[in-house]
Structures are given as C-alpha cells and as structure tokens.
Amino acid sequence: MRRAADAALPYATLVAMTTAIYMVFIFVPTDRFQGIVQRIFYFHVPLAIMTFVAFGTVAAASILFLWRGTRAWDRVAHAAAEIGMLFCTLVLVTGPIWAKPVWGTWWTWDARLTTTLILWLIYAAYLMLRSFSGTTDQGARYAAILGIVGALDIPIINRSVYWWRTIHPAVLVTREGSSGLADARMQATLGLSFLAFFLLFLWLLWVRHENLRLGDEVDALRRQALIHP
Amino acid sequence: MFALIRKDLQIEFRTKETLAALLLLGLLTLVVLSFAFDPTSELRAEAAPGALWVAVIFAGVLGLSRSFLAERDNDCLHGLLLCPVDRGTIYLAKTAANVLFMMAAQAVIVPIFVFFFNLPLSAALGGVVLSLALGILGFASIGTLFAAIAVRTRAREVMLPLLLVPLAVPIFIAGVRVTGRVLAGKPLAEVAEWLNLMLGFDVIFLVVGWLVFEYAVEE
C-alpha cells in the first residue's frame, strides 16, 4: 500500500489538478451576472468541503487514538489538522476576494462565514496546543481531546451563529447567487475540482503522515543511540 | 464526590483568594467596558448584556486556571488521582466547585452591573439568573477539562483562554441574546430556543468531559 500510495497519488493529483485548472480558466463559460470573479468558486467550494473532511478526519483519528492508543492515529490527526488549517485559511482568503465585487463587502457575519472563522480559531488553538505540549504521549492525548470536543462543538456553533444572524437584521439575505450552476460545463468543472482537491488532500495527508512517522523513528533511534552508544 | 467538592470549598473559605480575584476582575471588566460606551447614549443599554458576559468570560478563565494551579503547585493532583474514585467523578466534583465559585462571584457582580448600567432588575432577575446558571455550567464543563490540560503545557496562562474561548462561542452568543431579551422586558418563552441550546451544550460537554477526563489527567 505504501508503494502504491507513493507512486500513484502524486500523479493522479497532478493530472486532476492540471485538468481542473484548465477547466476553470479556459473551458468553463463565464457567469453572466457575476462575471469573471465567479471562477474562484470552483476553488473556494471544494476547499471548504475538504476543510470539513480534514477536521472530520481529525476527530475520527482522535477517537481511534484514545480508544486504541496507536501512535499512527495520532499522526493522522496531526497531519489532517495541519492540512485542514491550510485549506481553511485558503477558504477565508478566497471567500472575501469573491465577496467584495459580488456582495460589495469583504466580510459579513453570515452564519457560514462566522462558523468557518471560529473553526479556524479552534484548530489554530489545536496546533498551538500540539506545539506547546511536545511530542509526548500526553501531548497527543491532549490534542485528541481537543480534536473530539472541537468537532462536537462545530454543529452547536453553527446553530447558534445561524440563529444569531437570523434574529439580527441581515446585511445580505441572499447567499450563493452562484449556486444555480445551470450549465453542464459548470457542473463538470466543479465536480472535477472536488476530485482534484480530494486527491490533493489525500496526497498531502500521506506525505505529512510519512514525514511525522520518520520523525518519530529518528527520535526512537536517537534515544536508542543514547542508551547504547 | 461531595467530599471532593467540600475540599475545594474549604480551601477557598480559608484563603478566599480565588473568589476575591474573580470578583475584582469581573468588576474591573465592567468598569473598563463602561468607559467604552458613552454614558448618555442609548447604545449603553444595548451593550449591557455584552459587558456582563465579557466579565463572566474573563473572571471565568481566571478562576478555572487557578483551580488546577493550586492542585499542581503542591502536587495535590497526584493525591487526588490516588483517591479510590472514578476519574469522571473527580471531573464532576471539580466542575461543580468551579460552577459554585463562578456563581458566587456573579452574585456580587450582577448587582454591581445593574447599578452601573442603570437597569431594571426586578422584572428580569429570573431570566438573567437562569441564563447565567446555564452559561456558567457550560463554560465550566469545557473549562474544567481544558484547565486540567492547560496546566500541564508550557505557556499555560495563555493556553487556557486560547482553547476555551472559541469553543465557548455558542454559550456567549446564547447568553448575550437571552440576557438582552430578558432585560428588554420580553418573556422567557421568546428565548426558549436559546435556553435549549445552552442546556444541550451543557449536557453534551458534561458527558464528554466525564468520559475523556481520564485521558487528560493520566500520566
């Protein structure tokens, strides 16, 4: 499996991503109302979904780590949290770029935007906790607890933010003027973008996991060398 | 479990350190926030619930981090872990003690808050107390869990608020909404969904804390 993942994932990602970029910039027709800026949507939405996939992976791997105590699950959670953080940051960057010309404002306290921002803050704290508690088993358990609590908290945060905004007068009532992807070419582009970012996620997860595993191995070897010089 | 709660309360009654610190910090927050708003404007009444909840957060974070620092300093945590009780029970006792401290501090902070912001207390008292009780229970339920974690990391003073504040966002939004509505003279039925949300938060995270506390204190 290791051999296959090493060989296949980078190439599959490369092909899918190159095709996706071609489709986004050349193949897909420009949106009639939003103009050229709508094309960022094909990156923004898959990134947002992959952010949730990544943080879902963190929670699942955290539960498995606390349950089984296998170090590999801790590495998966660590790697997924870092990638999720990267994707979440990109979502928060691409969103305003789209929102400024379409909504006329960089930011609004819309339910989705606010949830994403708080998600970002929780996982920023997660990575802080990891770096402050070292690479011990204890630190791994702490991170796993936060991974689980954070994932459970997300739906509640979403609910509360949603009610908060619906009770307040909303600045922008309509959202997703672009969700009506009537054109089949648009749907195909979005579908391929999903695939490309999913493969990118898997590949990055794999590479980072291997990287962390090698780091653990080096640590173990160094400790051995100290005991038996 | 009651013995564990009594232990925390007894320590507190003898020193009165945490409670005094909680009170002063809450009071200071209210004073500083009073400067942020024009004392004559209408905005002031609007901002009042927010000010109260910011005071709850600040005082709460301080009290929670103290609750485990005391255990750590004299190595009491080890003694506590050697008790022949379930780790979940220790968690529930610690949470209960923290809730009691925070509620006690609020018993003084709320009248001062009413006094500074010139609010009609009598009609809204029940709603404010209910929202504070639910909010503080939820805040303490995740706070106790993460205080146990933060106390054993480097930079523990900054770690706790970083972990706690984003997770407690639903509590603050719900708390501010409920307090605001109730102070505006609305009936409690209007904010029932917010109270449900807080209750749900409390139940979920008390159960989760009870289940995973074991991993937080394990050596």
Image (cartoon, rainbow, N blue to C red):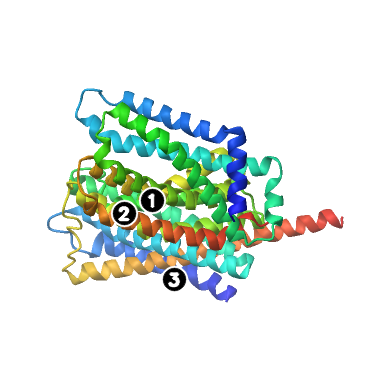
Alpha carbon separation for disc pair 2 and 3: 50 Å
- Amino acid type for the residue under numbered disc 1: Leu
Q: Residue at x 53, y 39 (%)?
A: B158
Is A146 located above or below residue B122 in the figure?
A: below
Q: Reply above or below: B122 against A51.
A: above
* Residue B117 figure quarter: top left
Q: Nearer the viewer, residue A210 or A49?
A: A49
Rendered location of residue A137, percent (x, y): 66, 58
Q: Quadrant of the N terminus of chain A?
A: bottom right
Please report, as a chain letter, where disc 2 is located: B
In the image, residue A62 lies at what x, y percent?
A: 54, 63
Crowd class of label 3 (few under 14; some 14 to 19; many from 20; radius 10 Å): some
Q: Element at badge 1?
A: helix
SS class of the residue under badge 2? helix
Viewer-proximal residue among B123 and B25: B123
Which of disc 2 and disc 1 is earlier in sequence? 1
Is A166 left or right of B100, judged from the image as shown?
A: left
Q: Are marks 1 and 3 on the same chain?
A: no
**Percent x, y of residue B120:** 24, 34
* Local crowd size for mark 1, using a 10 Å CA cut-off: few (<14), some (14–19), many (≥20): many
Q: Residue type at mark 3? A: Ala
Task: Give yes or no for contact between labels 1 and 3 (Cβ–Cβ under 8 Å).
Answer: no
Which residue lies under the disc numbered 2?
A: B195
Does residue B179 appear left or right of residue A58 in this picture? left
Q: Nearer the viewer, mark 2 or mark 3?
A: 2
Residue B103 image offset from top left, x and y in percent:
44, 42
Mark 1 highlights which residue? B134
- Displayed quadrant of residue A45: bottom left
For residue B197, above or below residue B63 = below
Picture disc at residue A12 = 3
Which image quarter holds the C terminus of chain A?
bottom right
Q: How many marks?
A: 3
